[in-house]
Image (tube, helix red, strand yellow):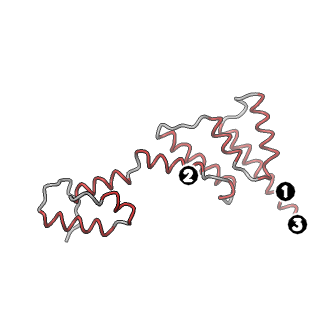
């Protein structure tokens, strides 16, 4: 038996029944509920392809959820945290869902640990005085510098 996906609905009932059974056996309960009413294997395949493709509301929802779930505490370093924020921000932009800079900055700063409060205060004060005081790259550079300073401080305190 070969595993070929036919892009047609014009197959015998025997082939359709076999393919339909094979697909249904591979599905968890959630996806199975989505397609249980469909009687043609090709139509189930198309429905599942649409359900799991990286387009539409589901992928946008997952992307937003991942972004809003991103916190410094979930990463080993500031660099990993900022790289993930940048990646998700770029992915949102690619889906025509670019976040305004103020929201991006607020999200980044709000999800830092307590040890970053002094630098967060300094950055927010600078932004209050001049909304263009930081670009994304300069904000990231400041946060990376602060993380290095804090790490150096921790290293010196443990000696």
Q: CA distance from mark 2 to mark 3?
A: 38 Å
Residue lying at 29% horizontally and 66% vertically, measured from the top left: 24
Q: Nearer the viewer, residue 104 or 151?
A: 104
Q: Residue 30's spot in the image, x, y percent?
A: 39, 62
Mark 2 crowdedness (10 Å alpha carbons): few <14, some 14-19, many ≥20: few
Q: Which quadrant, please, contains the N terminus? A: bottom left
Q: Residue furthest bottom?
A: 1
- 90 left or right, relative to 116: left
Question: Could you tell me if the residues under marks 1 and 3 are in contact, i.e. CB atoms within 8 Å?
Answer: no
The label number, if any, that marks residue 95 in the structure image:
none
Quarter of the image for residue 75 reads: bottom right
- 30 left or right, relative to 96: left
Q: Is residue 16 above or below residue 130?
A: below
Q: Residue furthest left?
A: 12
Mark 1 crowdedness (10 Å alpha carbons): few <14, some 14-19, many ≥20: few
Mark 3 crowdedness (10 Å alpha carbons): few <14, some 14-19, many ≥20: few
Question: Could you tell me if the residues under marks 1 and 2 are in contact, i.e. CB atoms within 8 Å?
Answer: no
Residue position for label 3 = 159
Q: Residue 120's spot in the image, x, y percent?
A: 77, 43
Residue position for label 2 = 66
Q: CA distance from mark 1 to mark 3?
A: 10 Å
Q: Nearer the viewer, residue 147 or 18?
A: 18
């Amino acid at each position: 038996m070969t595993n070929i996906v036919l892009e047609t609905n014009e197959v015998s009932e025997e082939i359709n029944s076999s393919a339909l059974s094979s697909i249904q056996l591979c599905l968890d309960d959630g996806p199975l509920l989505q397609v249980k009413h469909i009687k043609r294997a090709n139509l189930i395949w198309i429905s599942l392809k649409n359900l799991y493709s990286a387009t539409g509301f589901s992928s946008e929802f997952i992307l937003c959820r991942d972004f809003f779930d991103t916190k410094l505490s979930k990463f080993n370093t500031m660099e990993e945290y900022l790289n993930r924020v940048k990646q998700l921000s770029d992915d949102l932009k690619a889906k025509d869902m670019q976040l305004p800079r103020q929201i991006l900055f607020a999200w980044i700063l709000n999800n830092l640990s307590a040890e970053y409060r002094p630098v967060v205060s300094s950055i927010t004060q600078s932004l209050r005085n001049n909304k263009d005081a930081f670009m994304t790259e300069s904000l990231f550079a400041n946060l990376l510098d602060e993380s290095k300073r804090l790490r150096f401080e921790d290293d010196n305190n443990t000696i």
